[in-house]
Image (spheres, grey):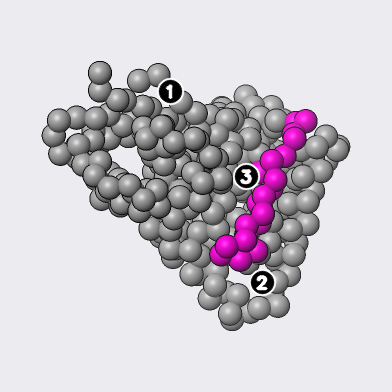
Amino acid sequence: MTRKVKVSAPGKVILSGEHAVVYGYPEILSAIDRRLSVEIEETGSDLDIQPIESRPFVEYAVEVIKTKLNVSGLNNLKIRTNSQIPLGCGLGSSAAFSVAITAAFFGFLNLPRSLKKINEIAYEIEKKQHGTPSGGDNTISAYGGFLLYRKETESFKVFSSLKTKVFPQIFLINSGKPEESTGEMIKGVKDFVLKTPQEAEKIFKEMEQITRNFLRFLSGEELNFGDLITINERLLEQLGVVSSKTKLLIQKIESISGSAKISGAGGLKDNSGIVIVYHEDPKVIEKFAHEGNLDLFRVKLGERGFKNEKC
Ligand code: PMV
């Protein structure tokens, strides 16, 4: 019988602290119920990768995994990727891929599934995609749930799983794929930091405060979730990572008593990727999205990290 394994890993949203995390401030991430799966099967022929567009990234990931695990060969594999996570709009699709393929190799090679090791290797793969990522995306995809995450230095990252009492019901609206890559958005913020360091520090400190308030909210304190989302969005706008088009969309949501923020790197020129939307009455948002022909979907927060799937 040929060996075959299939592993899935979740996408993510960032509730608070994106960009600030690059400068050592904390962020809160949550895994969502949109997943990406990787299936590995032994075949008689050469490396067969589907879908074909994923080939360069899959080949790179396989090389990283082989080097890190100190294994050779493994050329006769069929690797299939299947995803429910839209690409390149801040939902962590590349991190979910990095985690799922690493965990699938651990399964395929019958290695004990060490979360820590899988996460470390996934981070190495993520670097190819993003240059200098904080590592938050792969960590939430590996561990799942909600995480408070902080990158102190390249080799020292601290995070803690949050025992949440509240699971806010949110929607996501896809404002469209940004023209800029995550790396370009990070570079834009870096320029802002270099040009106006005091202003940037003030924004990051306020973000940190909001992140702490999110923590208090998730642990059951009575705080207004919508207000936290709105303040967070304003700070991201001040950092220059939200486009005029997306700001307009968010203003419209606020005008019907909702709250919204971008999640992830954002985008300045045209689209800004995924927008988190919250309203006390979900029907209002559904009607708004329907009338505006917007790409709206509901997601569950706090979902499981990587897991085996039936082949
Ligand atoms: O949009 P994404 O999924 O690439 O998220 C990026 C979040 C940043 O804080 C901007 C960068 C990072 O590596 O944490």
Q: Residue at x 70, y 66 (%)?
A: 203
> Is label 1 in a helix, a strand or a loop?
loop
Distance from disc 3 to disc 1, alpha carbons, whole Å, reads: 24 Å
**Which of marks 2 and 1 precedes in the sequence?**
2
Q: Which residue is mark 2?
A: 200
Q: Amino acid at mark 2?
A: Ala
Asked if disc 3 is less than 8 Å from ligand 1, the answer is no
Q: Which residue is mark 1?
A: 309
Name the mark on residue 136: none
Residue 283 x/y as whole percent: 62, 24
Query: What's the magenta region?
Result: 147-166
Question: Looking at the rendering, which quadrant does residue 45 occupy?
Answer: top left
Residue 90 x/y as whole percent: 49, 47
Q: Is residue 129 left or right of residue 238?
A: left
Asked if disc 1 is less than 8 Å from ligand 1, the answer is no
Q: Residue furthest bottom?
A: 195
Q: Nearer the viewer, mark 3 or mark 2?
A: 3
> Is label 3 in a helix, a strand or a loop?
strand
> Is label 2 in a helix, a strand or a loop?
helix
Q: Is residue 299 left or right of residue 95?
A: right
Q: Nearer the viewer, mark 3 or mark 1?
A: 1
**Which of marks 2 and 3 precedes in the sequence?**
3
Q: Dot 3, crowdedness within 10 Å: few (<14), some or many (≥20)?
A: many
Which of the image's four quarters has the N terminus?
Answer: top left
Camera-nearest residue between 270 and 204: 204
